[in-house]
Image (tube, grey):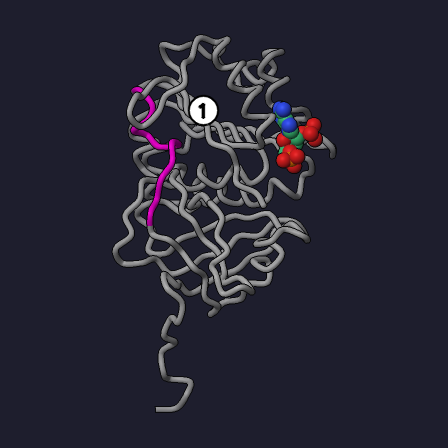
Amino acid sequence: MTDQTIPKVPTLPDAQTVTYVKHWTDKLFSFRVSRPASLRFRSGEFVMIGLMGDNGRPLLRAYSIASPSWDEELEFYSIKVQDGPLTSRLQHLKVGDELILRPKPVGTLVHDAILPGKRLWFFATGTGFAPFASLLRDPQTFEDYDEVIITHTCREVGELAYGANLIASIREDEMLQELIGTENLAKLRYYPTTTREESPTMGRITDLLRSGQVFADLGIEPIEPGADRAMVCGNLAFNVEIKEILEGFGLREGANSDPKEYVVEKAFVD
Ligand code: A2P
């Protein structure tokens, strides 16, 4: 046996191997790692991942799993913060590197935490798209709802690329296509908006909800508690604001132990 044929044995506790890295912008990247055989999770949940710190202790942060629960690997979508303790190092990950992953998934952005409904909204800003990248690839999302609407607000157009690419790949996926349909008014609606660079739809989704523009643009009725369910993942100020808006439409916040009409989780950043 030569060195090259000896399989790489993980040396860290809970170590997984990086299988894919893609840089979307100078501030955003996604990567995939091997999945521990014992790891079961619900689409939309998060786990702690990280690297070994200089002090010999693991440096871990919460990351939403962006891949669906059926996937053989695990995908993550991350910001790069130049002076962030973890992401300043994580952004240099290469295929074959090791990543620490604690296999204890948790989270509230799960189907179990909301009551059955007709229309499901995913509201994301920035890297808050990640849990929805998981849920959008889970057939249950389209089996349980007549319509699924994902909104994604970012500062610049380039920051929409990961999400836009994922939506395109879902529309091309044969199995999901059967569930979603291929007609013009198919089940999956994608509503990207930008706030600091020109794009077809400009503005914060919060403002577009308040003005009613999002409903007009999509040609749909406003949100109401009988039919609409929502999951929210973004920065803190966004989460606070959209909660108020959803409550204004009559939706109540749910939890795993007490499902209601909407759930919220903050996007995890360094
Ligand atoms: P804006 O450019 O107007 O601040 P960030 O990169 O800071 O996490 O923001 C991601 C996106 O979320 C940006 O488009 C930003 O818009 C938007 N955003 C920030 N705060 C809020 C808020 N309170 N309500 C709605 N959108 C917000």
> The N terminus appears in which quarter of the rendering?
bottom left
Residue placed under numbered mark 1 in the picture: 121
Q: Is residue 140 left or right of residue 199?
A: left
Q: In the image, what residue occupies the spot 60% across and 40% down?
A: 160
Residue found at x 39% / y 91%? 2
Apparent side of residue 107 relative to residue 246 in the rendered image (left or right): left
Question: Label 1: few (<14), some or many (≥20) within 10 Å?
Answer: some
- Residue lying at the far bottom of the rendered structure: 1
Question: Label 1 amino acid?
Answer: Trp
Query: Can you tell me whether the CB of the residue at mark 1 lies under 8 Å from the nearest atom of ligand 1?
Result: no
Residue 184 locus on image (x, y percent)? 47, 27
Q: With 108 as the anchor, is 31 left or right in this view?
A: right
Is residue 95 shown in magenta? no
The correct choice, above or below, for 58 with respect to 152 in the image is below
- Residue 268 image offset from top left, x and y in percent: 52, 40
Judging from the image, what secondary structure is the residue with disc 1 in? strand
Q: Quadrant of residue 241?
A: top right
Please state if 253 lies on the left or on the right of 26 as rendered.
Answer: left
User: For the view shown, which residue lies furthest in the left direction?
Assistant: 38
**Which residue is found at the position 55% from the left and 40% from the top?**
127
Q: How many marks?
A: 1
**In the displayed structure, would residue 116 be above or below residue 153?**
above
Region in magenta: 104-115
The image shows residue 84 at horizontal and vertical percentages of: 63, 51
Residue plotted at (37% across, 56% down): 73
Instruction: Note whether 145 is above or below 251 in the view shown.
Output: below
Rendered-image quarter of ligand 1 = top right
Front in this rendered view, residue 175 or 126: 126
